[in-house]
Image (tube, rainbow, N blue to C red):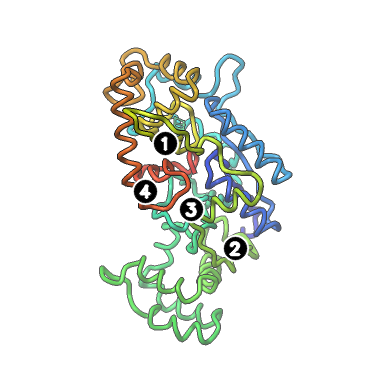
Amino acid sequence: MKNKKVRHVLGISGGKDSAALAIYMNQKYPDLNIEYYFCDTGKELAETLELVNKIEIYLGKKITRLKAIKNDHFEPFDYYLKSVGNFLPSVQARWCTQKLKLEPFEKFIGDDLAISYVGIRGDEDREGYISTKPNIQSVFPFRRNIWSIEILSKFFQNENNELHLKLYQEIAENSIFLRAKEILKTPKDNKFTLSKKFNALLAISASTFNKVMFEFLKDKNYPISHLKEFSLIEHEDNLNREDIFNLLRNSGVGVPSYYEKRTFTVDGMTGEYARSRSGCFFCFFQQKIEWIWLYEQHPDLFRKAIDYEKDGYTWIQGERLEDLIKPERIRAIKLAAIKQNEKNNSKKSPYLIDLLIDSENVMCANCFI
Ligand code: SF4
């Protein structure tokens, strides 16, 4: 049965992009009754928790804190670590994201239909690591293309070409229809790929494409199929990194403080470091220079991260944290960071370390965005 209630949800990870998305949605689509949530692993930086509080004040709305387990003796991470026999998570074995982020989120949604707004920017080429439950649909408001790859693939089946023409003729202004007609008729193949086809249509009018897609989805089985209207249908924006920083600064929420560059000196040279992501203080995704940042800026947390390394398990493959902080090792890591920052200087960002995150493909919308 159609027209079932659909929830609108937005996860705050503690990173800059989801924070900026909450601000953007609040400014641009105040009519949407968005539920905000934050999955707390119990191992977040104080700066992250502070950011979540600031967004809550800015929104004037509660951000629901989700904990994978409520236990008086263990924080969620420690509880699951014990249950897997102290096996530390890693890029290859990310049980932590599944248990501490995805499962609490999916439990929060239950069997309800939900549209989940995800803060992947217009200047990024990835989908993120998101829920694949059929009752949860991801939408990407920072991109000109707000639709997920799964929906686009369904839409752009060649056998739908006649239907696309019909929908465009009914919905689009005549001048837009005439410009889109040849593109719509051309079958998708190895040369005229899905991405080329839909980018050509978006370039003519993203809002028209959205209206056609909304109509196309009406008799399908997605959460959005149950909506009578959808606020993002007129969406044309495409926000990049600079826009995200501007949203954060202009709203008064500000940029998460762990992004702020701090200087260090090594061999008479001055370098800069910061942390590039939200998430657990010991997250195995952090780079070696970020571990040194943790050691020097939050020595207490670094000590705690060391305490987790037992039974041969380490956070960094092949290197114990105890070894990472030997003076010669710190020197080498800092020198390498200075070199890397010089290379990155050609790219535009007020937060140099933030550039490093883009070099990694395995990203998690729940932990870092
Ligand atoms: S932040 Fe890192 S350690 Fe924490 S849950 Fe996410 S991937 Fe795992």
Spot occupied by residue 152 in the image (x, y as percentages of width and height): 43, 63
Badge 2 marks a residue whose secondary structure is: helix
Q: Amino acid at mark 3?
A: Arg
Marks 1 and 3 close (CB-CB < 8 Å): no
Q: Which residue is mark 4?
A: 345
Q: Is residue 328 left or right of residue 228?
A: left
* Residue 309 vs residue 244, the one in the foreground: 244
Q: Which residue is mark 3?
A: 241
Residue 312 x/y as whole percent: 31, 15
Mark nearer the N terminus (2 vs 4): 2
Q: Earlier in the sequence, mark 1 or mark 3?
A: 3
Q: Is mark 3 within 8 Å of ligand 1?
A: no
Which residue type does callout 1 highlight?
Glu
Label 1 residue near ligand 1, CB within 8 Å: no
> Foreground: 126 or 343?
343
Q: Is residue 191 above or below residue 104?
A: below
Q: CA distance from mark 1 to mark 3?
A: 20 Å
Query: Which numbered circle lies on residue 233?
Result: none
> Is 75 located above or below residue 112 in the figure?
above
- Quadrant in the rendering for residue 92: top left
Marks 1/2: CA distance? 40 Å
Return the residue at label 2: 232
**Secondary structure type for disc 4:** loop
Outermost residue toward the front? 268
Give the distance between the C-alpha atoms of the residues marked 2 and 4, in whole angstroms: 36 Å
Secondary structure state at the residue bearing disc 3: helix
